[in-house]
Image (cartoon, helix red, strand yellow):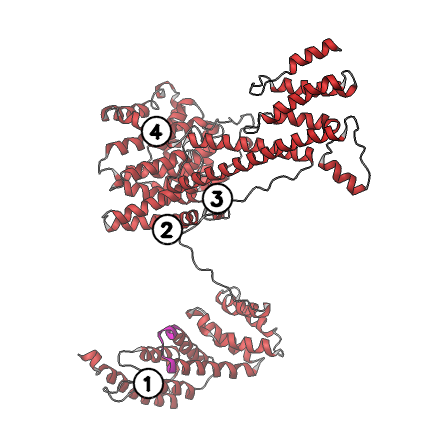
Amino acid sequence: SKVLLDHWVKTLSLKKDEKIVNPSKLRVDLRFYGDLITSGIFQFKEALPLLGNILTVLTTSDREEHNNISIILSFCKHCGEDYAGLLPKSMRMLSEKFNIAVPRSSMLPPEKQKNVRSLLKDYYGSLCKHLLKEHSEMQSFERQNRRILQTKGELSTERKERGEALAALFQKLFNGTLNFAEALDEDVPVLPEEKSSKGDGDLLLMGGGLDSDDVTSLSIWEDEETQRFYTEFPNLKDYLPNFKIIKQEKTSVASMTEENLDEDLKEEEDEDDKKEEETVAEAIEEYEEGDNNTNSSNKILLDAFLNLLPNCVNREMIDNAAIEFLMYHNTKHHRKKLVKVLFGVPRTRLDLLPFYARLVAILNPLLPDIATDLSVLLKHDFKYHIRKKDQINIESKLKVIRFISELVKFDLYSKIEGLYCLKVLLHDFTHHHIEMACTMLETCGRFFFRSPDTHQRTKVYLEQIMRMKTGKTLDSRYVTMIENAYYFVNPPELPVTRVKERPIMHEFIRHILYQDLTKPAEAPKVLEYMRRLNWNDQQIFNYAIKCLTQAWNVPYPNIKDLANLLAGLVEYQESVAAHVVDGVLEDIRIGLEANTKNLNQRRVAMVKYLGELYNYRMVESNDIFKILYSLIAFGVATDHDLPSPWDPPEHLFRIRLVCTLLDTCGQYFNHGPSKVKLDYFFVYFQHYFWFKYSSPVWTV
């Protein structure tokens, strides 16, 4: 055993500052050496000094980096009970729960176990301090990243990599701390929660509208129909069961950043304009090659299909066109021809772009080359227009940017590249670039703004647009376009309107009177529903009278239906008519006394309602004439020098009320005493009119 011990001394000899070459081997060797001592292979007097020395070196030389966590933790789990008297926290809690004593090891005296335990606890204390320090650094780094996102909209690759490294290091330390706390029966340090500073709050609130936390609660799409259009496609396996869906390799977001796109744009800017034009022309000519090799009959069928493509102006037609192309025209040359036709959509047919994009999205699982080639063509065309910097062909520019936006919503064009197009337009925010940027925001701006991964960058670009609108002297047309695009993407928050809570019976009465009564199919049932009400209940009776009186809640053309309903209801509930008529007359009187513009529409509706009640014989002609005379006599001044506050000289609204009432029921005053009364009234009405007309307000 002495020879074996000498070999262990050579193997486990460590100096204080010596770097551990193979931690995994040392972890196994330390555990195995401890088991050898426990098994009695080595004597305590000869073997324990070496074990104490290596534990001291491992703990004291690693108080800063804590790279030896796995080695020490392995020793604590397997040999800690014998050498340090350790009892895991979970074991202690179980023993206390079931009141069962756990046998303890007595291999070493308690004094020596206490020394080893204090050595391990000191190491655990330094580990906790290191964990809190790393947590604080990670929080500070995250705060800096949030500020950069709020001001720039994107993080650089270096900061992303550094953030990932910090997160990995913190997670490693946190897991080690949890395991150490379990082995030593210690408490885990409480990590302080980050408090949002005032500066961060100001940055979040800048610009108004939605915050990042509110985006997840909103739908990306305006309604369910729009969502189905952009997300639900026909199942191609029903038509071609033998085809296999091609799994596309999406470009990672980490590799596609604005820095890479800026480099690509700078490289392309070094080329001449002629080469650029030739590049686009050659890209289009490539899709024309090979047509001579195709069968003439197939060519005729393809031309007929492509000629009918502009007529596909709804979802069903474009879905059928996609399936037809997949089943009958799916060849390499035909796919190139289709890409050429899609790219060459007339600039005046912008309505076709969503349907063409849907066509490409349906074919994309089986024919991804169509989406790829079309995206390349649109990207080249967009960059060509940006470098050209001319003020012509605005329709072609809008077509390109709108097509790109539609492809973005179908996830056929990268969001990163789509936002980069917007950023390029903002670099030279003048003339046509303003129109292109606003068109892109109106097409897919809300999609960007409500997507969690692009919300922050879109918000930064929107704020930049509003700052440039304020800082530059722009034409009023451009200002209007910018404001419309901004508020379309990020509409202002509207105050929450509280809906008045009513009893269910009250809601039912309002529903049948104010909604069902306006529907020709439901109107005959309203009288039956009203008859079935519990008219003996005083609350229901009072509320029904109130709703039958408030004619301004009914659409103006349906006021006569409300009067007709009341006339039918009186045959079963006679007292209802008197209450309703009293309420109508009282409301007209209140309108004369108040004389506020806010009640004008209500006053017209009530006068119309009174006339309809007369038509259905609910009131007498004397009541009508009393209202007519009150309209031209109540509070009316007879001297221009002393105007009346109830009927100022510039107000002609009472004339309108008289005309409304006469238009409603005046046709029945054509014979007998009513005709004589009407003739007398016209004399006074003309006097009232000419008195108004002679006022200095109208004559001077």
Residue 598 in magenta stretch: yes
Do the residues bearing badges 1 and 2 touch, measured as CB atoms within 8 Å?
A: no
The stretch in magenta equals 592-601
Q: Are marks 4 and 3 in contact (CB under 8 Å)?
A: no
Q: Nearer the viewer, mark 2 or mark 4?
A: 2
Q: The residue tagged with tag 4: helix, strand or loop?
A: helix
Amino acid at circle 2: Tyr
**Crowd class of label 2 (few under 14; some 14 to 19; many from 20; radius 10 Å):** some
Q: CA distance from mark 2 to mark 4?
A: 31 Å
Q: Nearer the viewer, mark 1 or mark 4?
A: 4
Rate crowding at label 1 as few (under 14), some (14 to 19) or many (20 or more) other CA atoms within 10 Å: many
Residue 22, label in figure: none
- 1 or 2: tag closer to the N-terminus: 2
Q: Dot 4 corresponds to which residue?
A: 377
In front of the other: 37 or 144: 37
Q: Residue at x 75, y 19 (%)?
A: 45
Check the picture and name the quadrant holding the C terminus: bottom left
Percent x, y of residue 591: 39, 80
Secondary structure, mark 2, is: helix
All told, the count of numbered labels is: 4
Amino acid of disc 1: Ile
